[in-house]
Image (tube, grey):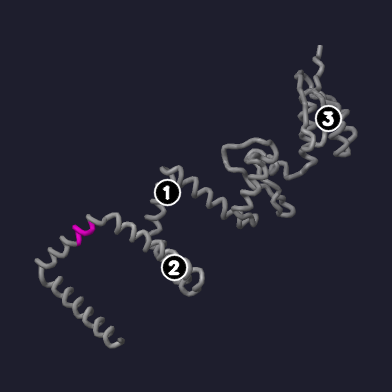
Amino acid sequence: MTCDDDKKKRKRKQESERARKRYAEDAEYRAKKLARNDAYQKEHRDEIAARQRENRASCRDAERKRYAGDPAYRARTLAKNMAYYWRHCDELNARRREKRSSDAEFRERLLERQNERRYALVYGLSREDYQRLLIAQNGLCAVCDEKPERRLCVDHCHATGEVRGLLCSNCNTALGLFADDPERMWAAVLYLLRARGKAPAWARCLSDMLGRGAASEQPPMPDVHVCIGLSARVGRFGVAAPAVASPASP
């Protein structure tokens, strides 16, 4: 049985060699062969395209498995890719810049990937972790309870490095400018209350939190005549204050 298989292989090889030789030397035979191939491709275009897609998909799967399991193959592939990039970096970067400026969907995907890499490197936060935080906050900023047009920022403690939640860019910047200092933030709240014309209940409450008994006794800022209504959500600030009206000056 093996001898018969070997004979068939030798015969097929000889026939192939004769066909290649004739194709190279006989112009009329070559033209007929090309015409038959073109006619077949036009007639079976969809079938050929489907087979090519399947072959590419199977080849990609095989390459991914080999790339993941074979360190030597992975190193060769990375070296080849880097060599190609440095040979064509100007052309590749120009095409990338053009596509980024003209394709909004590509620009959004690129920004998404950049954010994911940065969150993973800086905060150790995966894409799934970010999505869980986003769902837990209903897509809203953890401070102002509003949904911004831009992606929510990852807020973290600068002392411990732990992620605290997701904030809009304004709230995240505000915390950074206040250096994450609660005392400075409460002082800013008292400043605003005094500027809007005395809110004694709030001032006493905040002063007790800060241990500043004299803070509530400071006079309001002059020439401010506004009527304000102050309210706080129980559970967020832990207090609730009625509306307070500032007396108008004579």
From the image, tell me which residue sits under label 2. Answer: 62
* Mark 3 surroundings within 10 Å by alpha-carbon count, few (fewer than 14), some (14 through 19), many (20 or more): many
Q: How many labels does the image show?
A: 3
Q: In this picture, which residue range is highlighted in magenta?
A: 37-41
Task: Judge depth for marks 3 and 1 and give the one in front.
Answer: 3
Q: Pointer 3: what residue? A: 202
**Residue 154 pos. (x, y %):** 64, 47
* Residue at 76% from the left image edge and 44% from the top image edge: 181
Residue 5 or residue 192, whichever sits in front: 5
Is residue 124 positioned above or below 178 on the image? below
Viewer can see residue 172: no
Alpha carbons under labels 1 and 2: distance apart: 32 Å
Residue 83 belongs to the span the image colors magenta: no
- Tell me which amino acid carries mark 1: Arg
- Give amino acid for label 2: Ala
Q: In which quarter of the image is the N terminus?
A: bottom left
The mark that comes first in sequence, 1 or 2, is 2
- What x and y, as percent, mark residue 37? 20, 62
144 or 131, which is in the foreground?
A: 131
